[in-house]
C-alpha cells in the first residue's frame, strides 16, 4: 500500500512540475527593452504655457489629440500626460492655466488666476459638448482634482459652442448662425451659474468666418471686421473697415483680447486695445520681458527663422529677444505657442508648433530640442532591407556575373580577393576609400535580416527613416499640401524596388492627394537615405481612383505603379514597364454606394486601355447597406502547406485564391436592429464565393484575411460583447489545380468551416504575423483599447475545433471548442509598455523564418519582434558555447584515439 502511495505521489509531483514549467512562459527581467522600444507622444500642440522662473520649471501643453501634458523645458521630456477621451466626447475646447496674471494682464486680459490663488485651480480644461466636462488638474502630478459637467438642452447647437475664461468666470457661448449668440457665465471651479443666459442678436455670424479672441467674437464680412464684446453689460456691435478684402482666414492672437491677424497684419477690433498695426508676421504672441508686456513675432525668410520682440506700450523693438538661425525646410511653417524669459533678462525660450506637427524649443539661436509629434498619426509603414556591405556587395556582383568556364571563375575569384587585400592594406595605412554615410550610421544588412530601415508616413505628410533596432531617426522629409484620399483612405507607401538588387538602389513611392487641387501626387525616394529619386516629386493632372503594383520587371528590377483615374484611364510609372500591365485585373469600391467594380487592363499598339467587366452591388434591396470594411491578402504572403492532414491520413486541400477579397456591410433593421453582412468576392471574376449575415451585430469591425482563412471582430449588440468569427475555405480532398490558380477556371464552391468566439475585451485592431517562407505557424495579433497587443495562436481561433473531445480532433491536433478565448498576460507582447490609443499594427518578415517584425502605432509607437513557433532557427542567448566546444573536442579526440587503438588491434590480430 505504501508503495502505491509513493508511486502516486511521484506521479503527482511530476505532473505539477510539468504544469509549472508550462505556465512559466513570461518575459525575463533582463529581456525588457532588449528587442523592443517604445516612444510616447502627445500630438500636435494646440495651447501651451511656459514657466521658467518658478521652483519647478514646466511646459504645460494641450494638443489636438486631446492630451494634456507637462514637459521639461530643458529637454522636452514628458513628465506626465493625461490622455482624454476620443472625440467628440474628449475634444478639447479650452485649457486655462493658473499663471501670475497680475504681471501681464490688464482690464481686458483673459489670463487665469495665480497658482494656489483664491480661485482654487492650477489648470482646468473644457472638453466635449454633450456633455461638456470641466476638469481641474494638479500641475505637479497630473492628478484630477475636481470635475463638473454640463448637459445642454440642444445638443446639435452645442456642437459648435466655445468657451472662454475671464476674471474668475467661465463663459459658455452657443452661436446660432445668422441669428444670435447665447452667453452663460459659470463659476469655473463649481459650475454654478452667476446669472441667467444672455441672448445677443448677431445676424452677421457664420460658421467659417468667425473667431473668438478673449472676450470678443468677430467675423469677416467682405472688407469689414465685425465684432462684439460678449462680457459687456450692454453689448454693442463694433465695426472696422479694412483696406481690402482679406485673402486668408481670420486668426486670433493669443493673450490679447480683441486682436486678430488678417493677411499677416495685426488688427484690433477695439480701439482701446493698443497694438502695433505697422508690423506684419505669420505668427504673433503676447508675453512678458523684464516685467513689461511684449509682442513676439516669428517668420521664416530664406530658410532663416527670425524671432523679434516689441514692447506693447511703445512698439519699440527688444534687441535681447531677437533670434536669427538656420531653419530646416522639413519642419514647415512655424507658429509661436508660448515663450518665457529668465529673470536676468537673457535667454528667452521659445516654443513653436510647426506645420508638420512637430514641437520645437528655440533658445539663443539654437534648437534645444524637438518632439516629432506627427508620429502620433502614422498612416503607412514599411520595413526596408538595409544595403549590403562592401565585401557582400563584391561577392554579389561576382555571383551575378557570367561565370563562363571554371578557369575564368577561378581567376575572377583570385582577382577579387586581391582587391580586397589591397583595400584592407590601404585602410590600415590610412589611404583607403572613406566609408559611405550609410556605413558610418551602421546601416548595413546583418546576417539574420533583423536590422532594417523602418519607413513611416504620417498624416501631415512627414516621412521618417527610423532604425528599427534603437529607434534613431536617420532622415526625414516633409511633403507640403498633401492629404489622405476620399472616404478617409490613407496615403499609400509602396516599395517599387527592394535592397536585394545590388548595386541598384532601393526605391519607394508615396501616393497622396494634393490639398489644393485634389489631383494625385507621387513622391519617389531612396528609403535608406531619404533622398529624392527618379525625379522626386511628381504632380499629376488627374485624380487617383485606384492603384496597384505590377510584377517585377527584368529591366532594373522595378515594380511598376499602375494608376486608375476618375475617368477609368490607366497610367503606369515608370512607362517602360507598362507592357507588364497587359491582362491585369483590378477593382474599385465605393463606400457611399456599397458598389464594387471590376476592370480589365489591356496593352495594345503601345497604349493602355481599361474595360469594366463586372459590378457587384452590396447596398441591399432598400439601398441602405453601407460598406464599412474591405480586406485583401498580403501580397508578401507565401503559403507553405496547401492542405491539412486529417485523422484518416487523407489531405483536405485549402481553397487558396489569391484574388479573394473580403467585404463587410452594415444596415439597420426594424426587427434585428442591426445587420452585418460578410462577403467573400473574387476580384477577377466578380463571383461571390461566400456570404454570411450576423443579426444584431454592429461596428467596430476589424478583418484579417490570410491564406484560406478569414477572421473578423464585431460587437454583438444582443449580449453586449465583442466576438470574433473565423472562416476557413477548403476545396475538398481533391485539388483542382496544384500549380497555377485561375479565377476564370476556378474549382467548385469551397467547403466552409466557421465558428465564433467570445473576446473578453474590446478589439481595436488585428493583424496576422508573416514570415519569409510561410513555414512558421500563423498567429493573430489583437490590439485592445487598453493598449495591449495579444498574440493569439491560430489553433485557438481554428473553426475546426470540435465541440466534444473525440479521436478525430486529437489526431488532427485540434483543441476542443470553448466559446471564451483566453487572454493570458504572458501572451501580451508589449507586457507593461501600454500603447495609448492603439490604432494599427504593421507586420513584416525578417531574414529568419521564425521571426516576424512588428510595429504598433497609435498615440505611441512600439516596435518589437515575435516568434510564433519559437526561435527554432536561432540558438538561445544562454547557449553554452564552452560546453559544446569541450564536448566536440572530447569526441574528436576520443574518435582519433579509438581509431588508433583499433588499427593497432587489427595489426596485432593480423600477425597472429
Image (cartoon, rainbow, N blue to C red):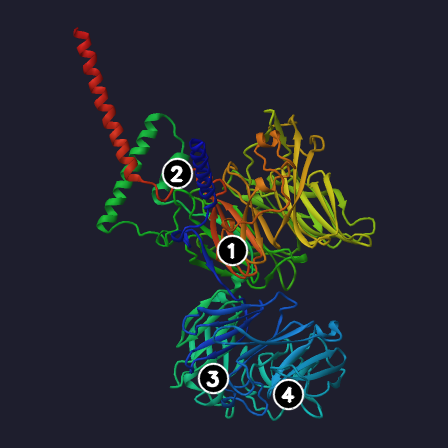
Relative depth, front residue between 343 and 899: 899
Q: Between tags 1 and 3, which lies in front?
A: 1
Q: Position of residue 375 (x, y in %)?
A: 52, 61
| Left or right of 897, for residue 325 | right
Q: Are marks 4 and 2 in contact (CB under 8 Å)?
A: no
Q: Which residue is mark 4?
A: 269
Mark found first going from the N terminus, 4 or 3: 4
State how far apart marks 4 and 3 are (Cα).
22 Å
Q: Position of residue 433 (x, y in %)?
A: 30, 50
SS of the residue at dot 2? helix
Q: Position of residue 887 (x, y in %)?
A: 28, 33
Q: Between tags 4 and 2, which lies in front?
A: 4
Relative depth, front residue between 827 and 393: 827
Residue 499, picture quadrant: top left
Q: Are marks 3 and 2 in contact (CB under 8 Å)?
A: no
Mark found first going from the N terminus, 1 or 3: 3
Relative depth, front residue between 788 and 54: 788
| Left or right of 184, for residue 849 | left
Q: Which mark is residue 396?
A: 2
Mark 3 nearby-residue class (10 Å; few <14, some 14–19, many ≥20): many
Q: Which residue is mark 1?
A: 456
Residue 62, picture quadrant: bottom right
Q: Which mark is residue 309?
A: 3
State how far apart marks 4 and 2 are (Cα).
71 Å
Amino acid at each position: 500500500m505504501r508503495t502505491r502511495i509513493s508511486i502516486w505521489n511521484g506521479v503527482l509531483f511530476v505532473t505539477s512540475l510539468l504544469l509549472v514549467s508550462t505556465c512559466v512562459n513570461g518575459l525575463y527581467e533582463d529581456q525588457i527593452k532588449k528587442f523592443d522600444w517604445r516612444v510616447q507622444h502627445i500630438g500636435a500642440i494646440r495651447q501651451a504655457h511656459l514657466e521658467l522662473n518658478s521652483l519647478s520649471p514646466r511646459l504645460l501643453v494641450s494638443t489636438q489629440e486631446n492630451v494634456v501634458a507637462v514637459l521639461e523645458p530643458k529637454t522636452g521630456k514628458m513628465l506626465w500626460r493625461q490622455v482624454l477621451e476620443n472625440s467628440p466626447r474628449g475634444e478639447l475646447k479650452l485649457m486655462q492655466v493658473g499663471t501670475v496674471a497680475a504681471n501681464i494682464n490688464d482690464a481686458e486680459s483673459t489670463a487665469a488666476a495665480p497658482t494656489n490663488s483664491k480661485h482654487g485651480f492650477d489648470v482646468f480644461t473644457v472638453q466635449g459638448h454633450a456633455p461638456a466636462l470641466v476638469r481641474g488638474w494638479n500641475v505637479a502630478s497630473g492628478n484630477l482634482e475636481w470635475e463638473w459637467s454640463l448637459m445642454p438642452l440642444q445638443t446639435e447647437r452645442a456642437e459648435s459652442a466655445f468657451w472662454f475664461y475671464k476674471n474668475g468666470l467661465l463663459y459658455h457661448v452657443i452661436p446660432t448662425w445668422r441669428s444670435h449668440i447665447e452667453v452663460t457665465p459659470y463659476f469655473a471651479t463649481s459650475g454654478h451659474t452667476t446669472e441667467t443666459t444672455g441672448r445677443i442678436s448677431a445676424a452677421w455670424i457664420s460658421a467659417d468666418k468667425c473667431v473668438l479672441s478673449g472676450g470678443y467674437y468677430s467675423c469677416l464680412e467682405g472688407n469689414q471686421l465685425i465684432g462684439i464684446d460678449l462680457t459687456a453689460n450692454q453689448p454693442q456691435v463694433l465695426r472696422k473697415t479694412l483696406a481690402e478684402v482679406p485673402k486668408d482666414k481670420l486668426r486670433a492672437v493669443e493673450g490679447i483680447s480683441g486682436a486678430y491677424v488678417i493677411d499677416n497684419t495685426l488688427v484690433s477690433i477695439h480701439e482701446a486695445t493698443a497694438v502695433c498695426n505697422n508690423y506684419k508676421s505669420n505668427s504673433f504672441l503676447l508675453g512678458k520681458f523684464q516685467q513689461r508686456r511684449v509682442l513676439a513675432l516669428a517668420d521664416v525668410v530664406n530658410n532663416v527663422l527670425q524671432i523679434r520682440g516689441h514692447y506693447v506700450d511703445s512698439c519699440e523693438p527688444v534687441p535681447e529677444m531677437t533670434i536669427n538661425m538656420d531653419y530646416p525646410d522639413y519642419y514647415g511653417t512655424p507658429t509661436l505657442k508660448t515663450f518665457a524669459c529668465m529673470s536676468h533678462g537673457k535667454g528667452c525660450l521659445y516654443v513653436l508648433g510647426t506645420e508638420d506637427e512637430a514641437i520645437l524649443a528655440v533658445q539663443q539661436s539654437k534648437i534645444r530640442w524637438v518632439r516629432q509629434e506627427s508620429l502620433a498619426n502614422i498612416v503607412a509603414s514599411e520595413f526596408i532591407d538595409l544595403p549590403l556591405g562592401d565585401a557582400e556587395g563584391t561577392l554579389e556582383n561576382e555571383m551575378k556575373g557570367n561565370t563562363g568556364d571554371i578557369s575564368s571563375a577561378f581567376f575572377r575569384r583570385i582577382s577579387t580577393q586581391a582587391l580586397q587585400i589591397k583595400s584592407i592594406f590601404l585602410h590600415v595605412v590610412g589611404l583607403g576609400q572613406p566609408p559611405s554615410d550609410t556605413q558610418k550610421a551602421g546601416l548595413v544588412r546583418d546576417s539574420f535580416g533583423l536590422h532594417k530601415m523602418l519607413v513611416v508616413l504620417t498624416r501631415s505628410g512627414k516621412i521618417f527613416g527610423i532604425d528599427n533596432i534603437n529607434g534613431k531617426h536617420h532622415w526625414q522629409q516633409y511633403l507640403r499640401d498633401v492629404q489622405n484620399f476620399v472616404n478617409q483612405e490613407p496615403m499609400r507607401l509602396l516599395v517599387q524596388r527592394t535592397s536585394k538588387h545590388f548595386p541598384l538602389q532601393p526605391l519607394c513611392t508615396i501616393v497622396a492627394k494634393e490639398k489644393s487641387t485634389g489631383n494625385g501626387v507621387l513622391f519617389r525616394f531612396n528609403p535608406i537615405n531619404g533622398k529624392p529619386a527618379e525625379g522626386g516629386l511628381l504632380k499629376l493632372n488627374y485624380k487617383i481612383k485606384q492603384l496597384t503594383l505590377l510584377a517585377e520587371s527584368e529591366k532594373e528590377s522595378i515594380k511598376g505603379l499602375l494608376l486608375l483615374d476618375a475617368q477609368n484611364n490607366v497610367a503606369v510609372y515608370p512607362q517602360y514597364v507598362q507592357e507588364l500591365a497587359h491582362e491585369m485585373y483590378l477593382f474599385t469600391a465605393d463606400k457611399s454606394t456599397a458598389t464594387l467594380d471590376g476592370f480589365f487592363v489591356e496593352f495594345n499598339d503601345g497604349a493602355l486601355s481599361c474595360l469594366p467587366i463586372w459590378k457587384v452591388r452590396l447596398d441591399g434591396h432598400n439601398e441602405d447597406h453601407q460598406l464599412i470594411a474591405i480586406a485583401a491578402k498580403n501580397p508578401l504572403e507565401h503559403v507553405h502547406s496547401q492542405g491539412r492532414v486529417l485523422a484518416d491520413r487523407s489531405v483536405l486541400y485549402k481553397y487558396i485564391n489569391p484574388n479573394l477579397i473580403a467585404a463587410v456591410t452594415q444596415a439597420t433593421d426594424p426587427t434585428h436592429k442591426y445587420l452585418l453582412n460578410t462577403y467573400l468576392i473574387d476580384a477577377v471574376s466578380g463571383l461571390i464565393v461566400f456570404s454570411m449575415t450576423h443579426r444584431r451585430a454592429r461596428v467596430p469591425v476589424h478583418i484579417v484575411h490570410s491564406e484560406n482563412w478569414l477572421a473578423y471582430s464585431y460587437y454583438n449588440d444582443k449580449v453586449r460583447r465583442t466576438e470574433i468569427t473565423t472562416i476557413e475555405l477548403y476545396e475538398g480532398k481533391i485539388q483542382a489545380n496544384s500549380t497555377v490558380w485561375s479565377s476564370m477556371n476556378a474549382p467548385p464552391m469551397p467547403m466552409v468551416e466557421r465558428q465564433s468566439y467570445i473576446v473578453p475585451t474590446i478589439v481595436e485592431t488585428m493583424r496576422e504575423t508573416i514570415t519569409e517562407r510561410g513555414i512558421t505557424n500563423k498567429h493573430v495579433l489583437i490590439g485592445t483599447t487598453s493598449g495591449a497587443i495579444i498574440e493569439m495562436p491560430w489553433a485557438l481561433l481554428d473553426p475546426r475545433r470540435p465541440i466534444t473531445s473525440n479521436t478525430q480532433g486529437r489526431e488532427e491536433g485540434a483543441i476542443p471548442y470553448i466559446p471564451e478565448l483566453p487572454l493570458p498576460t504572458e501572451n501580451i507582447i508589449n507586457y507593461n509598455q501600454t500603447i495609448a490609443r492603439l490604432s494599427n499594427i504593421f507586420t513584416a518578415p525578417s531574414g529568419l523564418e521564425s521571426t516576424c517584425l512588428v510595429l504598433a502605432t497609435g498615440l505611441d509607437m512600439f516596435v518589437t519582434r515575435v516568434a510564433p513557433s519559437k526561435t527554432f532557427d536561432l540558438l538561445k542567448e544562454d547557449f553554452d558555447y564552452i560546453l559544446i566546444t569541450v564536448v566536440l573536442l572530447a569526441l574528436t579526440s576520443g574518435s582519433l584515439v579509438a581509431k588508433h587503438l583499433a588499427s593497432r588491434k587489427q595489426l596485432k590480430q593480423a600477425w597472429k
